[in-house]
């Protein structure tokens, strides 16, 4: 089924990238639908440029015809930020064919990759040289570095290495006018003007198209250790975090928390996964990276945990003895999203708070929700070291999930976000805004901040053609 | 001598901040002249607000009268970015009275400080709680945190902790329209819209006025070790850096380099300072911070240096045995700027390069300059771990420095900056642009980048009243 081409744009796009890379027929759902199937649109065409120059040509052609563009990487986003709307008038710009690693500079500890490179390919390229690219998240086998930067992805190593933003030294961007900004310098210091790099990072394709990035690498640590620790309360988990930070310093590279119900769901739906610790209110997953070696790492790690046990900060602990055990511990953590999906739809929140406010938030919000809707169940897990919780609300046992969401989602969101706002938190820690949270952000962000953001959007994309309806 | 008030603004300013804080008489050179005495202007008034609300009132009053504002912190900048021009029509906005530490949150590892806080006061407040604020630079006893952020200051700990930008989680800003943006959240993850924080950081007061910041703290390391190592070439220094990064990982917190002539000048002008190593082509100063303790630190450090000595990467080394020896090593490094000033005026460059290109830059540029102007002397030192050199050119022995500068500064700048540009470097690594490098930046930055910067300036400061003539 060929699509209509009201603007007469398709011939120009075919000239720009070759007819084979302008898709208008057949099943385009891989690009038109997000992977969680919450958003489904219809594109004028799916365009797959193979170079930065081709991206620029596509942007210019669309600009000349007043056609909107939706940039897309691996299409693994969680907020509906990279699929077209259902008007059939937007061009879906897929960056997947821009997937070359352009350069690895070991002496400078940098790697330059095109936007469409899969995150795992970047990690592996670094690793093959004995180096580390630390960005790590569940979708790493299919998400792209361009998408990671456009959404400022977080993940499990932020505690030590920061978000995607912190791992990027430079960008190449095609502006909304179709010009190429080459900002790919691999410099650790460069104070020559406004920070355009960080403006494009996290802008979700609404200001221009990231086509390549120069990324920071680190020496590979010599050893990694993983442990689980049972704690009686969120307060104790925060206390353990402080001890771990003081004792391990930058060696502490992961600090994840999981509530009892989250691990109960894993136990229920994945009974084949061994859980080293008995059920308890909260379980912490700690990861340590060591520059010296395993014996050194183990000594430090066990010292930390033994002292915490003695001081009753933790109830119990298990240190992985082998790489397999370590992977199994991470696998438990990573199985939570799947286990909750098996249990039925729930209401998801990706929130951040000052670490010092986390325990108060959890105690207060858990209680308020239970009072409002007795029996609801909380799947609460996340990156405690960064103050980031995935605070998800599951229907009461036996209730129909769809009905529960229909009846209560708006009220629960309001209750959770009000509590987050009251404690100075964020309604989107690492997933971004996209289409999903655009209205919520507009309601909660200060008018001054929104005014500044709109002024920037207007300045850099006056035609409003870059990923319209997202973010701002 | 009372100043003219063509716009009738002074009564409004006195209403806003109190008459005692609107200075128009007497010697105002502390605000009107930069500390290197390269820039001297004349303000309509020096205004010293005591709160964010007062800053906003001053900005609104100036905006209503179309009067330009020049924000100033500790007035320690190096590029003429914070003194008024000589028109007598600009208001000098001093942030010095905004000097409260608002809050220290140990569990969240954050500290919120007003813009006028002296950097050293911030360091000391953190230290009193057993915590570390790692930003450290020569002017720390008098520069302010607002100025550090407005100029994205660098310094000696960037290798491990990043620039001022990387140490800031949130800002409070008075916009060019006199509105207050409260972005002081102490969150480590927050993906709700464009990165306004990083846009204001490094914008040198041209987009608004930073009035407060929430800063990242770290646990204090348990031990610090310092060493000097003699290396035969810049290439060896880079090689030593790679070894130190692999061996010490994040424990490597300082890696400074000094050429032979820089230390010769210290030897000449400060003969009382003991130099632990004999003269050599290059000397590296290494600093290690350790979370375990001194014995552990010493073992790692000595292992690194012994292996480097054995493999002939270094010629000689001295490890500080006491805190005094450690301070003396840093004092040698910090005495270079003073020693070169004693020797006479020179031509300064604050450049950054990919670390992998540093040796080639030095070899090639040293030779080219020596060929063009036989006898000139190079004071070359800096933060090698960040690829940042202070590459300064001193007149030949016996030549009059002022004549040398007059005759050769433009040509030498062109030669140095051409070499920097050819290797993908930056003409301002950590000092910023200000008035000093504005034209040079406009010549060397890509038209696309300049266009984006001007669009942002126009969007956020359409009247052009924030620090005009600086940066863009």
Image: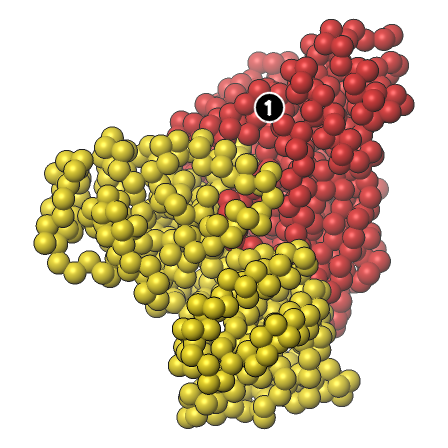
Chain colours: A red, B yellow
User: How many tags in the picture?
Assistant: 1
Residue B348 placement (x, y as % from top left): 49, 67
**Does residue B237 appear to the left or right of B400 in the view shown?**
right
Helix, strand or loop status at disc 1: loop
**Residue at x 52% of width, y 57% of height:** B428
Q: Closest to the observer: B411 or B76?
A: B411
Residue B268 placement (x, y as % from top left): 46, 90
Residue B171 placement (x, y as % from top left): 41, 44
**Residue at x 74% of width, y 30% of height:** A55
* Vertical position of residue B333 compared to residue A380: above or below: below
Residue A368 placement (x, y as % from top left): 47, 29
* Vertical position of residue B404 compared to residue A15: above or below: below
Label 1: chain letter: A
* Vertical position of residue B28 compared to residue A66: above or below: below
**Does residue A48 appear to the left or right of B386 in the view shown?**
right
**Residue at x 55% of width, y 48% of height:** B443
| Few, some or many residues within 10 Å of mark 1 (<14, 14–19, 20+) | many
Q: Which residue is mark 1?
A: A470
**Does residue B205 appear to the left or right of B67 in the view shown?**
right
In the rendered image, which quarter is residue B173 located in?
A: top left
Q: Closest to the observer: A218 or A347?
A: A218
Examine the rendering and report whether any part of residue A370 can be seen.
no
**Residue at x 55% of width, y 78% of height:** B376
Q: Closest to the observer: A445 or A165?
A: A165
* Vertical position of residue A26 compared to residue A170: above or below: above
Examine the rendering and report whether any part of residue A177 can be seen.
yes
Rendered-image quadrant of the N terminus of chain B: bottom left
């Amino acid at each position: 089924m060929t699509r209509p081409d009201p603007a007469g744009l398709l011939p120009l796009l075919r000239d720009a990238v070759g007819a084979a890379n302008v898709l208008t027929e057949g099943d385009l759902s891989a690009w038109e639908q997000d992977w969680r199937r919450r958003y489904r649109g219809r594109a004028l065409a799916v365009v797959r440029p193979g170079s930065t120059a081709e991206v620029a040509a596509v942007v210019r052609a669309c600009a000349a015809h007043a056609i909107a563009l939706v940039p897309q990487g691996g299409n693994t986003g969680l907020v509906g930020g990279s699929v077209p709307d259902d008007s059939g008038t937007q061009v879906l710009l897929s960056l997947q064919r821009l997937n070359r690693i352009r350069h690895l500079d070991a002496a400078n500890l940098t790697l330059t990759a095109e936007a469409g490179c899969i995150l795992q390919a970047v990690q592996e390229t670094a690793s093959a040289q004995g180096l580390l690219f630390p960005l790590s998240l569940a979708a790493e086998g299919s998400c792209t570095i361009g998408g990671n930067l456009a959404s400022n992805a977080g993940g499990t190593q932020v505690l030590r290495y920061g978000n995607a933003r912190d791992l990027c030294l430079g960008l190449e961007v095609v502006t909304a006018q179709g010009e190429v900004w080459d900002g790919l310098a691999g410099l650790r210091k460069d104070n020559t003007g406004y920070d355009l790099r960080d403006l494009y990072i996290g802008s979700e394709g609404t200001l221009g198209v990231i086509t390549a990035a120069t990324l920071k690498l680190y020496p590979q640590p010599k050893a990694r250790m993983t442990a689980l620790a049972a704690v009686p309360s969120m307060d104790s988990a925060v206390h353990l975090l402080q001890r771990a930070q003081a004792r391990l310093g930058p060696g502490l590279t992961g600090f994840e928390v999981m509530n009892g119900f989250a691990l109960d769901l894993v136990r229920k739906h994945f009974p084949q996964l061994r859980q080293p610790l008995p059920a308890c209110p909260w379980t912490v997953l700690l990861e340590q990276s060591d520059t010296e070696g395993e014996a050194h790492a183990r000594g430090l790690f066990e010292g930390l945990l033994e002292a915490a046990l003695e001081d009753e900060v933790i109830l119990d602990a298990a240190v992985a003895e082998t790489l397999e055990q370590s992977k199994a511990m991470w696998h438990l953590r990573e199985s939570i999203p799947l286990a909750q999906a098996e249990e039925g739809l729930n209401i998801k929140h990706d929130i951040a708070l000052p670490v010092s406010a986390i325990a108060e938030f959890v105690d207060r919000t858990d209680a308020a929700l239970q009072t409002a809707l007795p029996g609801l169940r909380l799947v609460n897990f996340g990156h405690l070291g960064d103050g980031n919780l995935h605070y998800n609300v599951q229907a009461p046992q036996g209730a129909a999930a769809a009905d529960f969401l229909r009846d209560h989602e708006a009220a629960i969101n309001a209750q959770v976000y009000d509590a987050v706002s009251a404690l100075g938190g964020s309604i989107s820690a690492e997933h971004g805004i996209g289409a999903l949270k655009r209205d919520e952000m507009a309601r909660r962000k200060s008018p001054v901040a929104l005014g500044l953001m709109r002024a920037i959007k207007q300045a850099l994309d006056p035609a409003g053609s870059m990923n319209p309806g997202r973010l701002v």
